[in-house]
Amino acid sequence: MNNNNEQKRIFITGGANGFGLAIARFYAQQGWRVAIGDIVQEEQANAAVTELQALASEVRYFHCDVTQDNDLQTVADTLATEWHGVDVVVNNAGVAQVGAIDDVSMQDWQWITEINLLGVVRGCRVFTPLLKQQKSGHIVNVASMAGLLDLPNMAAYNTTKAAVVALSETLENELAPFNIGVSVVCPSFFRTNLGSSMRSTVPNMDKTLDKLMSKSDLSADDIAAQVAAAVSQRRFYVLPHAQARRMWRLKRWLPRGIYAKLMQKQFAKAGGRK
């Protein structure tokens, strides 16, 4: 345990499994106090807490639905009282949706927007007053390379993640005078449990997603370490995957028409045409 960090405190939404648990595990190994919020079943929550308690100086679990303002406010109020604040807030909870624009229902658009975008907005809104009062802290918003690259058949997911990037960019400027840092995490495909909550109108998309995830040379733990490095360095963008970084640079540097043809060609090559 790192005694220098013993009193450091982190809260992570979606922290009982997948990428959120990987972040919690990394900070627990550094001796931080770790609080996780999730809506998983009691057995899974207990398993996550047991794993983290073997590493962290203190662990708290909150049943926290990011679509509910009161759930997040309860976490913030509890940590302010019992831990006298929080140093890092990670808005990680998210879901996936895949489908063509004319296939995806408005109900699915509302569902993914409520969680992926407004869930992050709620986390930022609720914890910012506490961070301002402390005159310190760091917000980490988990977006995706889908928020920077425009893959077809993913309009709802891409849109929510792009909005998280825009929100984070805005807050980096807005919160700097209060000594509050902001980072946005934009991973590509990697092995996680995102598919368990995915809604899709594309046949066999679960198998396709599993195949893409299995090809990643980075694990959730690898990316969690990159997130922690960005927080310590007060670095904004966390773009873990090299190939995705190259595509993002092409999008920024190439004329739109050339980049769009490149993306469409890759999409067709992958069998994406209906």
Image (cartoon, grey):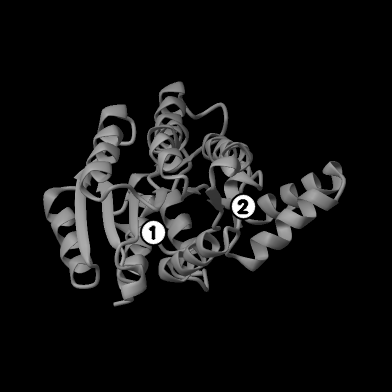
Check the picture and name the quadrant holding the C terminus.
top right
Q: CA distance from mark 1 to mark 2?
A: 29 Å
Quarter occupied by residue 65: top left
User: What residue would you read off at disc 2?
Assistant: 271
| In front of the other: 156 or 165 | 165
**From what the image shows, is residue 105 above or below residue 79?**
above
Viewer can see residue 153: no
CA neighbours of label 2 inside 10 A, class few (<14), some (14 to 19), many (20+):
few
| In front of the other: 210 or 251 | 251
Instruction: Find residue 207 and name its label.
Output: none
| In front of the other: 227 or 156 | 227
Disc 2 is placed on an element classified as: loop
Viewer can see residue 192: yes
Tag 1 near tag 2, CB within 8 Å? no
Does residue 182 appear to the left or right of 224 in the view shown? right
Name the residue at 31% across, 53% down.
15
Where residue 60 appears, as percent x and y from the top left, is: 20, 53
